[in-house]
Image: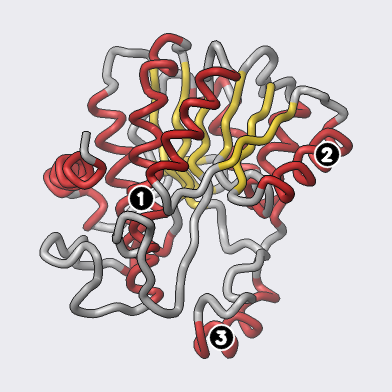
Amino acid sequence: MSAQGKTVLITGGNAGIGLETGVGLAKLGARVLVTSRDAAKGAVAVEDIKVRSGSEAVEAVTLDLASFASIRACASDVLQLAPRLDVLVLNAGQVNAKRTETEEGFETTFGVNHLGHFLLTTLLLDRMRQSAPSRVVVVSSHAHKSARRGLDFSDLQAEHRYRAFDAYGKSKLANIYFANELARRLERTDVTANSLHPGFVTSRFGKDGDLGLMGKLGMPIARPFAISQEAGALTPIWLSSSSDVDGVTGLYFYKRAAAETSKAAHDDEAARRLWAVSEELVGS
């Protein structure tokens, strides 16, 4: 694996899998840009990555995926900072015990995990085409398999019924739909798009009350079976830098190998429909 001379942008790169992905790619020679909602936390992450990777080519960009204004400002900053963009790692995500809304009024789990990344990618896509061969790496999850019936397009914002794990699973299915449809739309451009499951990773998932009572009771039981954040970053690092996946697009990976998705994730018509709906929602 090598990322020498490449420029990589990692959303949610100030902590967890995103931070470890930044360390790994910086070690491989990449110039790494990490996003963080909090500028101070972003600055701390930059210093951490520099120390552990031995690279000085690390910078932070402020990004709040729950705000279209912030997403547009971030994209503008990246375009000014990076004459080329070789890899975009869409890693940031969240889950919430109670239904909340983004700045534009979208349900937060859907708005952050899918819609915010959709807008950011479309704003940076021309730069990635110019930088080709380039890669979009989407961090999804095996949690997408909980959305057995697919997405409910009549209630994408979970206004009629909201359950934390249901919303999270559907957002992870949306990640796969997005990666697959992006891959289809980028055929013959030398820009690839793939999604992945990082594994069940030790993180702050459920520790901050974001899953309510179920998180407080269930996560401590499950956490001993989790893998480290460093291990969770192995597949994103590999997909971002390995020659093994040169030209490979539209697939889902786990443990650095192609993996099977749910039956619902094979619905290409749903993927195309989600793209069209997302364009309307972001006002493209």
x and y, in percent, of residue 86 in the image: 53, 19
Q: Determine the secondary structure under disc 1.
A: helix
Q: Quadrant of residue 268?
A: top left
Question: Disc 1 designates what residue?
Answer: 114
Question: Disc 2 designates what residue?
Answer: 47
Amino acid at pointer 1: His
Q: Nearer the viewer, mark 2 or mark 1?
A: 2
Quarter of the picture holding the C terminus: top left
Amino acid at pointer 3: Gly
What residue is at 38 percent from the left and 44 percent from the top? 68
Front-most of residues 130 and 181 = 130
Front-most of residues 188 and 48 = 48
Q: Quadrant of residue 220?
A: bottom right
What residue is at 44 percent from the left and 30 percent from the top? 136
x and y, in percent, of residue 103 in the image: 37, 57
Mark before the other along the chain sequence, 2 or 3: 2
Q: Nearer the viewer, mark 3 or mark 1?
A: 1
Mark before the other along the chain sequence, 3 or 1: 1
In the image, residue 116 sits, relative to residue 189, either above or below, namely below
Number of the label disc, if any, that sits on residue 218: 3
Quarter of the picture holding the N terminus: top right
Is residue 102 found left or right of 152 in the rendered image? right
Amino acid at pointer 2: Glu
Number of the label disc, if any, that sits on residue 46: none
